[in-house]
Amino acid sequence: MSVSKPLPHDAARLHVTGAARYVDDIPTPARCLHLAFGLSQVAAGRIKSIDLEAVRHAPGVVGVWEANDLPSDCDCSPSAHDEPMLSGKTIHYFGQPVFLVAATSYLAARKAVKAAEILFETRDAILTIDDALAAESRFEDGPRVWSKGDAGEAIDTAPHRIEGEIEMGGQEHFYLEGQTALAIPQEGGDILVHASTQHPTEIQHKVAHALHLPMHGVRVETRRMGGGFGGKESQGNALAIACAVVAAKTGRPAKMRYDRDDDFMITGKRHDFRIAYRAGFDAEGRVLGVEFVQYARCGWAQDLSLPVADRAMLHADNAYHLPAIRIESHRLRTNTQSATAFRGFGGPQGMLGIERVMDHVAHHLGTDPLAVRRANYYAAAQDVDAGGGPAPRSAQPNAPRDISGPKKDADSTTRGASPTVSQMPGAPQPDRVRAPQHQTTPYGQAVTDFILHAMTDRLERDADYTKRRETIAAWNAQSPVLKRGIALTPVKFGISFTLTHLNQAGALVHVYQDGSIAMNHGGTEMGQGLFQKVAQVAASRFGLSPEAIRITATDTAKVPNTSATAASSGSDLNGMAVKAACDTIRDRMAEHLARLYQTEPGTVRFADGHVHVGDAVLSFGEAATLCYEGRVSLSSTGFYKTPGLQWDRIKGRGRPFFYFAYGAACTEVVVDSLTGEYRILRADILHDCGTSLNPALDIGQIEGGYVQGVGWVTTEELVWDSEGRLRTHAPSTYKIPACSDRPDVFHVALWDGANREDTIYRSKAVGEPPFMLGISALMALSDAISAHGSRYPDLHAPATPERVLSAIQRVRDGD
Amino acid sequence: MRQLAITVNGEVRTADVEDRTLLVEFLREGLGLTGTHVGCDTTQCGACTVIMDGQAVKSCTVLAVMAEGAEVRTIEGLADGDRLHPLQDAFSRHHALQCGFCTPGMIMASLDVIERHGADLDAQTVRHELEGNLCRCTGYHNIVKAVLDAAGRGSPR
């Protein structure tokens, strides 16, 4: 069976030979126009005068559009209809598209844009969280508040208390392939759009709206993206609409690719957050009550900010059972790019809030932070092995060495501190007596699949955490300049779209008469390996190798009404939909063949590239031919919707998630106290993918997610100046991790254990959860800085060398 | 406009280009060799890396006229018919790619690294040498593995 094999990415050969086509690689159709936006040079205000004569007469220019030249408002918003493609007179952010140019070449369009003469009347821009709070500039009527128990009372009566605040920056997606779209006019006014997008249906919907077409008049095709990370969930709408408008108006194909600087200036990024916290806890670090106030800087338009901020609230607990909690969430409107989806979708910010609390509590008590984390963990699932067969072992050399021990440990019917679970000497005993059926998240979902006790035990052992922590302390004592730090942090991430109706997917499968198969589904490929995983599912259903399956581009004409490939849901949803389609065809084939061979349909087997019918063994191709000749339909759609979800986002109550995905990471760093510079020395990761559909692809997601998460909390700094101009708008100043930043020692292993829920082959989603493993790097830096004195470092993210240096100063001054 | 003759993947290609035409434009738009990608437009991400007269260059800041008479090798010229170059094979086998956008530039840069360091190549050197080629997906771990594997198997060219 091809499922669970570590097969290469489906397009690996195309990628290594340069033959894989991205939108900009599609042979440019004849007479194609190239587009560019003219951007606002102020953050807030009005256009006093605009003179585009020089633009119109620039070489190669075919057309120029301002807002009122468009066929409609050309709204680009995925939510509140508040994003006209072109600004009109009112300016909301520095970099907002003001006008559109179509020219005969890419360069001609870009050069023409520069000839515009625009006078702006500026007003005071609302740029920061403080600006927005002072001006009461926000989305929704006021803060969202969810609570469980009386947190204030619990904190006030607790033996110990801390309070503090953490700032965390945004993050530019920096997909290597910038935003791109190509629109080709079709007969009868229809439009074909090739878009680099995670959400073809959204592009279809927005283009249809812009051109007053029914959705069937717009077809969107996406073969692949050169990276998405959430940045192509809604941020590609403007380009696709612009291309479609120009194509409809001129009758010529139109292509748009943002230059990298424009991409930075125009598109939204991860939300930056400030989280203020107050916590009360006992002598062992058990949190009795905690209050969070989350401030999210959402930018000028609503975009996906409400569900992002919701997900930050939904991850304010991370892996910890918090008996009393109050979460207040402010969604602030500012004159900056409209912050948008980014891997984790608010989860990382919410999670960093509680991880900061754990770190602060441990510092306050002078305890190992890992002991505090364990003391607060949700109680272990009663049987981590329930509901699934054996999982595949990782093919990696650093694969899990011992899978049976920890699982038996976690299978604790008493739920007390299992004596077989290793404990750090002197560490407080974790509270495992709470019955899983009674433990709920702050939003009321029961946590029944909690496996982090066992995972933490194993990672602690494999990474040699306890011993290394001692070694590091001894090393630091004799090293005045360099200090090392280590941290082990967990991840529990909720899987499902929190907008329940999005949890559906469709598929279309054709078996041709020669036995070859074409497969299509609503998910998009952005490098994550979704197509290969789903092809492995299809191949397994027919007993074939994946080469028998042709994976075709995502196409709104083949599978309609799809959800974004987002929320880590791609293989969960589309894998199930494809399975349903395959099984329909398989059943029809089995029924026909059974009749031909005088046997029962239930006995027909599809295995090893053959179909076994009674005593006969047919090749799959022969079987397909027989079915075709027997006039059996060999094409089927498939559909899936996630069961059991219900969620009230206003009350903050329900079951928004089908299940949780887990992981843990241990990171060690060394910090130079003279410069604030640092290196990651070693990272050890243990991550839960359920029964992995493809261990090689999953490990790739984990490694890449971790490094991207580390980038978020360390080097990736977005800087806006006092005028609201983003100053870090190219890789010269915005630093994503480079090859040399990779940890010196990097071990990644998969946790072996089936998903307790009935997901596709009992696998778990893997796109987003590993991103938050990167938080361990920030906590390791905090640990290293702590070696300089007794005061808590109060380290903000990203912990650039400048911030690290000032934290070291604070810690020393506090002595 | 002027006429240029550049040897690309062993074949002399001539074209009329404007003086300001970049080598990457010449390759992508003039010759249809779209395996060389434009990532950042400013010579920092390395997606457009090609080999020019034996050296890795970022083709988004080389003018096509500067390549007059040169030998240019792109990702399309690496495989020997259906047989992948050892680096291509290693990137594929070691899962050293995800979205694949950086892959052609990463492979061409690695070719140059292996050429200069030969079989002595170690992980530290690979990591340092590939600093100018950004990848947003993989975390680089498998890329380093692939390069070392290809280097170890000798005859990178």
Image: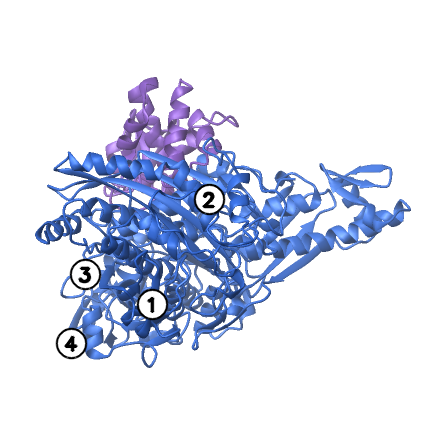
Q: For the residues carrying marks 4 and 3, which lies nearer the camera in this image?
A: 3
The percent coordinates of residue A712 (x first, y second) are 29, 52
The percent coordinates of residue A706 (x first, y second) are 37, 46
- According to the image, label 3 marks what residue? A720
- According to the image, label 4 marks what residue? A123
Is the same chain shared between marks 1 and 2? yes
Q: Colour of chain B?
A: purple
Q: Alpha carbon of mark 1 to alpha carbon of mark 3: how far? A: 36 Å
Is the same chain shared between marks 4 and 1? yes
Question: Which mark is first along the chain, 2 or 3?
Answer: 2
Establish if A487 lies above or below A167.
above
Q: Alpha carbon of mark 3 to alpha carbon of mark 2: how far? A: 49 Å
Q: Amino acid at mark 4?
A: Arg
Q: Colour of chain A?
A: blue
Judging from the image, what secondary structure is the residue with disc 4 in?
loop
The percent coordinates of residue A582 (x first, y second) are 69, 52
Q: Is residue A200 visible?
A: yes
* Crowd band around label 4 with a 10 angstrom C-alpha radius: few (<14), some (14–19), many (20+): few
Q: Amino acid at mark 1?
A: Gly
